[in-house]
Amino acid sequence: MFGGTVKRSRSGARFCVLLALAAAAAIAPRGASAADFELTAAVGLDTNGTFRGSKSSGFRPASHAYVELVRGEMLAGVFANPVKIQGENRALLLTYASWKPSARKFDLEVGGRYYAFPASSEFTYDFDRDGVVDHSGRKGLFEAVVGVRRKFKRGRLHLRGFYTPDNFAETGPAWYLNGEARVALVHGFETRAAVGYSGFAEQRFNENYVDYRIGINKSALGFDMYVRYSDTAGLSGADNSAIIFGVERSFTLAASPGADDRFEKIRNDWLIDKSLLGVFH
């Protein structure tokens, strides 16, 4: 149900900690001679929560906040928002780090991220609804990410792959493939369309499915805004079709004199859907 994510496995957690430490060491400013850096924070609100096309039930505004640091070809950050899973209200903390080099006309990405649900109990499955738990697993997740992006005069194409050796609630390997296209319109508007595929090794717990979305984005008066339609195909259960509006305000906390906009931050780069992740009952 939490398509393409993973448990708090020892190897995954260890890899993510090492990656975050390496990124922090590479990113941390070291005086006037340090490479360009920028420290950014943001808060945002979406009218309904979604994660890879799967949405929360009902009309439920979704808040989020993050802090992100970029230096050279390295990027790291922490993203937070409230979640409700199986009746529990908890905070989701997503820690992520990426190396983003460029090769010729392509921007590359290699990284990882760790989803933590502090003080959260295990996620349980009762397949035959007899009141007996058939499977339970921890909610902590690790995910590896690779990507490639190609910019054009009025747009860009972006492909990403995500993999976990053990999915949410310890339910086996899973992967997610996503492609996104952007085209600049008049007066600073931009249309974005994306399609993704979630695959799972263990079909008892999750269904393979496709998600897709199309929307219009606009930045004005210091706010980043969007309206989009999203839906899924091949996923049983509740209808996932939704029209969602989102708005976000970002702030530069610190930056070197030569900092530029080479890196698109999480608010623009859609490293994750910035909605209320995991709001499932």
Image (cartoon, rainbow, N blue to C red):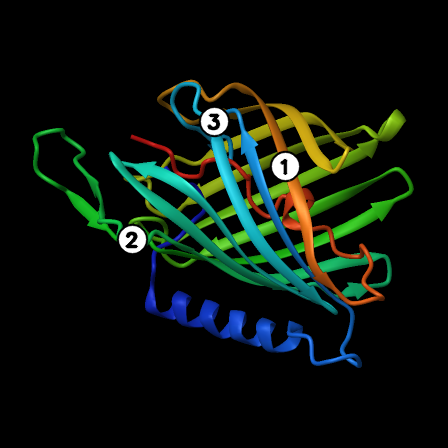
What secondary structure is marked by label 2? Answer: loop
Give me the C-alpha separation between circle 3 and circle 1.
13 Å
- Residue 64, how many percent across, how many down? 51, 41
Q: Which mark is residue 248?
A: 1
The N terminus sits in image quarter: top left
Looking at the image, residue 139 sits to the left or right of residue 66; the answer is: left
Q: Earlier in the sequence, mark 2 or mark 1?
A: 2
- Residue 228, how many percent across, how many down? 63, 24
What residue do we see at 16% from left, 35% from top?
126
Residue type, numbered disc 3: Pro
Q: Which residue is mark 3?
A: 61
Give me the C-alpha separation between circle 2 and circle 3.
29 Å
One can see residue 55 in this view: yes
Q: Using the image as rendered, state which of residue 165 and residue 183 is in the foreground.
A: 183
Q: Residues within 10 Å of mark 3 (few under 14, many from 20)?
A: some
Is 201 located above or below residue 248 in the figure?
A: below
Q: Earlier in the sequence, mark 3 or mark 1?
A: 3
Q: Nearer the viewer, mark 2 or mark 1?
A: 1
Q: Which residue is mark 2?
A: 170
Q: Earlier in the sequence, mark 2 or mark 3?
A: 3
One can see residue 2 in this view: no
Q: How many marks?
A: 3
Residue type, numbered disc 1: Glu
Q: Residue furthest right?
A: 153
